Image: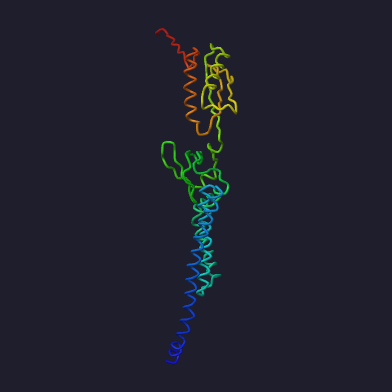
Amino acid sequence: MESLEGYIEQAPELIVTYGMKVIFALVIFIVGKYFANVAKKLTSKLMTKRNIDPTVVSFVANMAWALVFVFTVIATLGQVGVQTASLVAVIGAAGLAVGLALQGSLSNFASGVLMVIFRPCRVGDYIEAAGIAGTVDEITIFSTKLRTPDNKVIVAPNSAVMNGTITNYSAMDTRRIDLVIGVSYDANLQETKNVLKQVLDNNNYVLKDPAYTVALVELADSSINFVVRPWVKGSDYWPARFEILEQIKLALDEANIGIPYPQMDVYVKETPAA
């Protein structure tokens, strides 16, 4: 009875003491969450003004929000009397266990961080990586989303993309088209070169600088092969390639320059019946 009366007498003081701690903890949590959102918006705004890639902006802004929110939770728990040192140790042990169980996901996360930092490709680039090719639609923390020319969506793990060779076809403003044109051995070499050069000179896609190349490259088994290497804008690569090939065929036909195709002669030997 005496102990119960003692608790009753101390109840107002305990309520005031712990009640104030809970109120302060709630205030810390609300204010901290508000500042986390402010940090996210401010980071995003500042990076957007500097014309930084949207993928990097989103990633860094989310990281800023997460860091402020974690400190807010730790401060809130410390206010109500939770031993944060022990909590950090428990979180570290749990993180180690989860890390061992999720090695693949962590590898993708680390690769995503490296892709954001070094930026081997950006949203909108056409790349070839991890055995697939397509336009980069989105780079998330764990995966990269590509859209193929026939409008299929491929989601590849960041580790597969980052650990292999990445060919970025959109990194440079200009690209070179490499064509090999074979003509008959009966064709006049100088006339053939003039026809090929005339096609490139009259094509609107071909750039003047860098200059194109037209040269004899090989005396093959059934044809004389010329290399035709014009430079075009990266965005015009495929339309230019299709158009130049068509114009070369038409120009060679008009000049009566033959384009040979593989032939095989078969000899049949008859043997007298036994």
Residue found farthest to the top: 272
Residue found farthest to the left: 273
Q: Quadrant of residue 5?
A: bottom left
Closer-to-camera residue (144/89): 144
Q: How many marks?
A: 0
Q: Quadrant of residue 218?
A: top right
State the residue at coordinates (47%, 25%): 243
| Residue 23 drawn at (x, y percent) | 47, 74
| Residue 114 drawn at (x, y percent) | 56, 49
| Residue 190 drawn at (x, y percent) | 58, 14
Closer-to-camera residue (36/162): 36
State the residue at coordinates (53%, 37%): 170
Identify the image's colour scheme: rainbow, by chain, secondary structure or one colour: rainbow
| Residue 90 drawn at (x, y percent) | 52, 67
Residue found farthest to the front: 49
Closer-to-camera residue (49/238): 49
Closer-to-camera residue (56/151): 56
Q: Tell me: residue 218, above or below residue 57.
A: above
> Which quarter shows the C terminus?
top left
State the residue at coordinates (56%, 13%): 191
> Which quarter shows the N terminus?
bottom left
Q: Tell me: residue 123, above or below residue 61.
A: above
Q: Tell me: residue 26, above or below residue 229.
A: below
